[in-house]
Amino acid sequence: MTDTRQRLIEATAEALRTDGIAGVSARTVAARAEVNQALVFYHFGTMSELIQAATRAAVDDNVAYYRERFAQIGSLRELLEAGHEIHDRERETGNIAVMAQLMAGAQQDLLLAEAARYAMARWCEQIEVVVRRLMADGPLAEVVDPAGLAQMISAVFIGLELYDGVDPLGSRAAIAAVEKLVVLVDVVDDLGPVASRALRSKVRRASASG
């Protein structure tokens, strides 16, 4: 990647954090990158393509940053704790603001919608690996779809991140509810072999009838 292209990507991410998507333009990005405005269109064609490239690069960097942390997770409770850590860091770095801006712009722009899907998919990939590992020998493994559960977890955390900026108290109440669900899953995982077999049988019957 050329130095100019990288500078434009970094300038765009910073502009999204501080100015919001409405304040991002070829002029403002070029000024931040200290390059000629024409280079925006030379390297990316349109501002939407530049924003897409910037958000994809940010997501790739974040996923790489947290990969080792995800590999160390040994329970759903630890996954929730990791979620708290990620939330706090992403808020401090301004990446939550970028995601919020991306989601807002995605409603009207197909390229930004594609970037938002990419971001979700990258996080889901990492979470699914953890979920599959944690549920491998548990009583719910036969009936819970790891990919679907990973998508739900990703959607919940992104939703809470966006919700936090609007209603912090409501966001904390929602997180508390999630923590109680994690406690319930921990209890299920700690069941003895007899109770686990009974639960598996009951869950199979309920799943079949549903």
Image (cartoon, grey):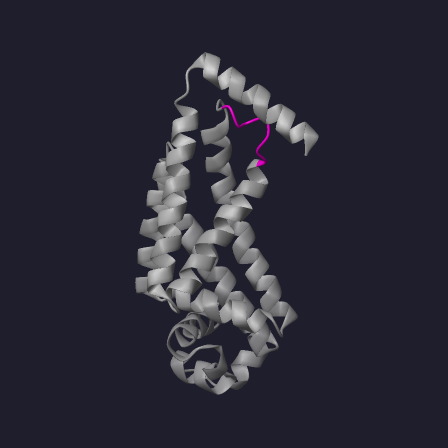
Image side of residue 44 versus residue 68, left or right: right
Q: What stretch is highlighted in magenta?
A: 139-145
Say above or below: 34 vs 79. below
Q: Which residue is drawn at 46% across and 68% down?
A: 100
In percent of width and height, residue 41 lies at 58, 80
Asked if residue 143 is among those painted magenta in the image, a careful observer would answer: yes
The residue nearer to you, when weighing 93 against 36, is 93
Say above or below: 55 vs 62. below
The residue nearer to you, when weighing 146 against 196, is 196
The residue nearer to you, when weighing 196 against 47, is 196
Q: Does residue 143 show up? A: yes
The residue nearer to you, when weighing 35 against 59, is 59
All told, the count of numbered labels is 0
Dominant secondary structure (helix, strand or loop) of the stretch shown in magenta: loop
Q: Which residue is drawn at 36% across and 43% down?
A: 179
Q: Which residue is outermost to the top?
A: 194
In percent of width and height, residue 88 lies at 31, 57
Q: Which residue is drawn at 55% across and 36% down?
A: 146
Question: On the rendered image, what quadrant is the C terminus found in?
Answer: top right
Image side of residue 198 versus residue 176, left or right: right
Say above or below: 105 vs 124. below
Q: Does residue 1 show up? A: no
Image side of residue 97 versus residue 123, left or right: left
Asked if residue 204 is among those painted magenta in the image, a careful observer would answer: no
Q: Which residue is drawn at 38% across and 33% down?
A: 75
The quadrant where residue 78 appears: top left
Image side of residue 29 versus residue 179, left or right: right
